[in-house]
Each structure stands twice: as structure tokens, then as C-alpha cells.
Amino acid sequence: MKVWIIFLLCLAGKALAAPQQEPFEEEFELIEDQGAIAEEETVVDEVIEETPVGSNPVQVETGEFDEAIEVVEEVPAENPCLNHHCKKGKVCELDDSNNPICVCQDPSTCPASSEEFEHVCGTDNKTYDSSCHFFATKCTLEGTKKGHKLHLDYIGPCKYIAPCLDNELNEFPLRMRDWLKNVLVTLYERDEDNNLLTEKQKLRVKKIYENEKRLQAGDHTLELLAHDFEKNYNMYIFPVHWQFGQLDQHPIDGYLSHTELAPLRAPLIPMEHCTTRFFTQCDADNDKYIALDEWASCFGIKEQDVDKDLVI
Ligand SMILES: [Ca+2]
Ligand SMILES: [Ca+2]
């Protein structure tokens, strides 16, 4: 969770803190039914364990979010359940023929959690003690309309989220863009041997980093952020593209699904009440996916500057 706390502090205009290496906890679910996609990603989780996660909290490995993964590995083991992975909310049990099967986890077997930051809020506006409790509960509703509609909405206990007004909606990308730029600069500054950025990315960030006109990280007014975007527009093009590339991973297809967006969206909602509205309106053609041009446009990037080569 640390990474997200830092992330949110940054959004609040605080100075950027040190990059973190912890992979994001498994907080989310596969919101859309993407069984086919998930199957292609079966190895992702294990790879992630060994790969240093970039310091950008948004650079979350979305493989962690794929609840629909059920894999039987062909490694012989005494207990067939040892290598049988069940999606979140399910646990492995042996059937009468000693074959491993995934069954719904009893929520009462989830580790007790009294810490507020471990609570999650469901789209049913109910607070669950932890994501384990949430997914176990959702599993018991599988096949029902209620279960289909139930998703993890955001991290933390449910609370009143004020409606996002039009003028507030316009403020959201101002902070977000500035934050993205600062994250990249911080990655660049700290990226000695960590390879948090590729060589190509480093060259692009170097230009931003070395630009004397760059607005330094800090607590800036919205007026200043708006002015800087106008004046130093070119510095924001790459960070917006880069963030899209970080999220577009499962699969890498130039579109962000609800699931791919979840690592960014869910922790933000309790802090930034315009999050849901912002990402909803980003999907301009309302096809449930955010394409690169839709993404760029909602961050104020001009059509002629949208470049899929910048995403890589
Ligand atoms: Ca995608
Ligand atoms: Ca769309």
C-alpha cells in the first residue's frame, strides 16, 4: 500500500517521495469477463515476482488483478493443490478423485483485518474488511445478477463521495499530468542501475529533466498548472503516453479495459472524487475501452501529437 500512499500524497501536491519496489497488493478483481484474455496471462504473476516493479505506483503489474486465472502446472507434487492456483475468492480443495478443484472461500477464513486501509468498498456500497472478504463474498454470489454487478469500487471503507462538478472535472487532468511528469523525472533521477526506464524512455525523459523551464515538483495552484501546460505543452506529451503504456498490458492492444485501468482508478477514487467521472468521459465512444487517442485527448494532448510509438 505504501506506493499508493505516496502516489496520493503526490497528487495532493506534496513533493515526490522515494520510489518503492513493492508490487501492488492483490486488491482488485477482473471486472469484465475476460476469461480468454486471462488465460493468455497465466504466467504473468510468477514473472512479476522476480521483476523489480518500477517506482511509479501506476506501473503496477496488472497481472496481479487477474482473478480469472486457474492454472494447473505440470510439476509433480504430493498435494495436487500445491500447484493449483485459484482465482481470488476461491481456494483449492480435492474432489473425490483427488483432483484439485477451486471452490468459494468462506469469508470467515480470511485473515482478520482491523486496519482501515485494508478495507475495501464494493459497488454495493458495503465496506468489506479486506479484499479477501470481498472476493470470497463475490464468489458466493457467482451466477447471480447481484454477483455479476458487484465489483470492487475503491480501496478503503465506503464513504460519501461528493458529485464531481464540471469545473472540478477540468482540474483533475491538470494535477494528473503534472504528477505523471514528476514521476518520470523522479524515475530518471533515481534510475542508476535499476532499469526502471528503457534507454529510449530515458532519452525522452532526459529532455524534460534538463529543460530549464520545467516546473519543479511542488504544491502549485491550478492557475500555475494550467499556465505551465500551455507554456510547456511539449513536456507533457510523453508522460501521458507513457502512463497509457504502463496500463495497457493485458493485452497490449492499444486499449485500456476497466481491469487495466483498475490499478490507477481504485486507489484514486477516495482521494479524487472526479476519478470515476473523468475516466468515464475519457471513453468518448462509450465502447467500455479507452483507446490511446481517447486517453490523450482527455489529458489535453492534441490529436496530431498522439503517437503510438511513444507508448512503448
Ligand atoms: Ca489493453
Ligand atoms: Ca472508447
Image (tube, helix red, strand yellow):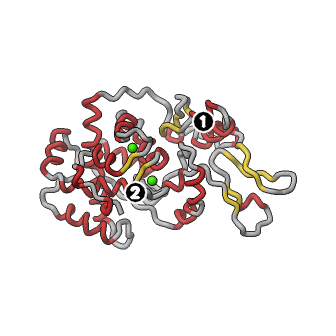
- Which residue is pictured at 81% across the width and 53% down the height? 94
Mark sitting earlier along the chain (1/2) = 1
Judge from the rendering whether residue 201 lies leftward or rightward of residue 91; answer left or right: left
| Residue in the foreground of this view, choosing between 169 and 133 | 169
Q: In the picture shown, does residue 188 fall above or below 146?
A: below
- Which residue is pictured at 70% across the width and 43% down the height? 105
Location of the C terminus by quadrant is bottom left
Q: Amino acid at mark 2?
A: Gln
Element under label 2? helix
| Residue in the foreground of this view, choosing between 277 and 23 | 277
Q: Please tell me in which quarter of the rendered image ligand 2 is found.
A: top left
| Mark 2 close to ligand 1, CB under 8 Å | no
- Which residue is pictured at 60% across the width and 38% down the height? 134
Element under label 1? helix
Mark 1, other Cα within 10 Å: few <14 / some 14–19 / many ≥20: some
The image shows residue 50 at horizontal and vertical percentages of: 53, 67
Judge from the rendering whether residue 239 lies leftward or rightward of residue 102; answer left or right: left
The image shows residue 47 at horizontal and vertical percentages of: 54, 66
The image shows residue 204 at horizontal and vertical percentages of: 25, 65
Number of the label disc, if any, that sits on residue 229: none
Residue bearing the label numbered 1: 148
Q: Amino acid at mark 1?
A: His
Residue bearing the label numbered 2: 246
Q: Is residue 14 visible?
A: no
Which of pointers 1 and 2 indicates the residue nearer the eye? Answer: 1
Marks 1/2: CA distance?
28 Å
Q: Is residue 296 visible?
A: yes
